[in-house]
Amino acid sequence: MENLKGKIISVYGSVVDVQFESSALPVIYEIIKANTYDNREVTLEVAEHYEANMCRCIALTSAYGLKRNSACFSTGKILSVPAGQHLYGRVVNALGIPIDDKGAVETADIIPIRSIHKTRDKDLSVKEETKLKYEIMETGIKVMDLLFPLVKGSKTGIPGGAALGKTVLILEIIHNIITKHRGTCVFAGVGERIREGNELYYEFLRTGLLDRSIMVFGQMNESSGARFEAAHTGVAVAESIQNKGEEVLFFVDNIFRFAQAGSELSALLGRIPSETGYQPTLTSEISEFHERIKSNENAAITSVEAVYVPADDLTDPAVVAIFSHLDTMLVLSRDYIQRGLYPAIDPLLSTSGFLDPNILGKRHYAVAQDVIRHFQKYQDLQRIVSIIGKEELSKQERTIFERAKKLQNYFTQPFFTAELYTGRKGSYITLEKTIADCEHIIHGDLDNTADEKLYMIGALEDLNSA
């Protein structure tokens, strides 16, 4: 397509209006190049068409320095990035440009980041779907493996408010799975702090995980357009690896910031917000993103997404829109943090669509149900104990109460990725050990052991050897 010439009419933060000389306009999502007064190139993406040959565009790089009436040109292309197999060990931005000072990615093998421009994958027929087999991916994290297993091809969310440990939990999952299972990891840092991305990079470098990892960053200091497209870039890279027949672990930190960037862009584009204050396109944007995370005949994409919960309000409209696409939710609790229970996963607020005896096996399912029943009874009794004291409970209730406290302490776990901060050596506990240990606690084998002895241990054999 011939490059079209236009000029900048106005700039509203990350939104730029461009008027073209001819009535032929660039297509939606087409890339337009403009230059600032100091000759810095700015990348624009067409978002909407208007009358008078005008396009409203989103700036994917900083729009600072653009001048009214300065010239710009359409490229005839949509945003594309290098295919995933060329990016192992690299850190790129939303445009697919390396930001790790290791030089450019020299390849002609590029992929579009938008699914609307991709060839639709062959849909699985009903007959093929019935043959799908659930495969549990062991993470080495006790509470997660027992109650909320990570299944290949599933979508897992880690919702929680500020400072509840979402990023640390994601890093531990990445560390354990890649170390034990040698998977391929694509990490999309969407709208989070530069410090977290820097720490993640050097942690991967220290542990030797970088060679099988790809990082895509659109951090909070960047434009809302870059933050929004970083998520699409990450999933496009994951798809390109999947289409080569490799299993992909796709991590997003933080998917709420993707919705938040969309809200900022929507306001700048002049759209009337919904009754909840978010963009009217919230549901479709979240859906478009999550529908790309799926299994095909080549391989599976397994996603783990951190979900920031504003003011710890799980009914926030953006959070609810994200929840509807998740198979498993590991809800982090501020109450658990205040009691020093790490990871702070609340078993009663969290849910999993795979807690089924046909998927887990009868023994695993039975133990998981027993543990949940103990926690439910503990929650009910805790209110009574806070008023009248534990001595007023019946013998049976007191036994359940004390065993539930032991289970709570047992599910705390030192993380490998937190060793520098806690001084405790990380532990990887197999699912078989976790099930056996929980059976011992539920059956009363540790009734004479103090609750504190179970805090921040690995398996029960560590307690016996101490």
Image (cartoon, rainbow, N blue to C red):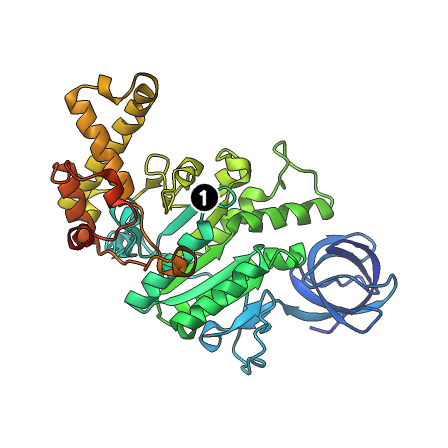
Q: Position of residue 183 (x, y in %)?
A: 34, 67
Q: Position of residue 178 (x, y in %)?
A: 34, 66
Which residue carries the number 1 mark?
A: 159
**Residue at figure coordinates x 41%, y 65% from the top left:** 185
- Horizontally, residue 106 falls left or right of residue 292, namely right
Q: How many marks?
A: 1
Q: Quadrant of residue 79?
A: bottom right
Q: Is residue 445 above or below residue 140?
A: above
**Residue at figure coordinates x 62%, y 39% from the top left:** 278
Q: Is residue 314 above or below residue 329?
A: above
Q: Position of residue 400 (x, y in %)?
A: 20, 29
The amino acid at mark 1 is Pro
- Horizontally, residue 310 falls left or right of residue 77, namely left
**Residue at figure coordinates x 80%, y 74% from the top left:** 39
**Residue at figure coordinates x 74%, y 73% from the top left:** 3
Residue 203 seen in the current view:
yes
- Horizontally, residue 50 falls left or right of residue 167, namely right
Residue 297 seen in the current view:
no
Q: Nearer the viewer, residue 356 or 57?
A: 356
The image quadrant where one finds the N terminus is bottom right
Q: Nearer the viewer, residue 154 or 26?
A: 154
Q: Secondary structure at mark 1?
A: strand
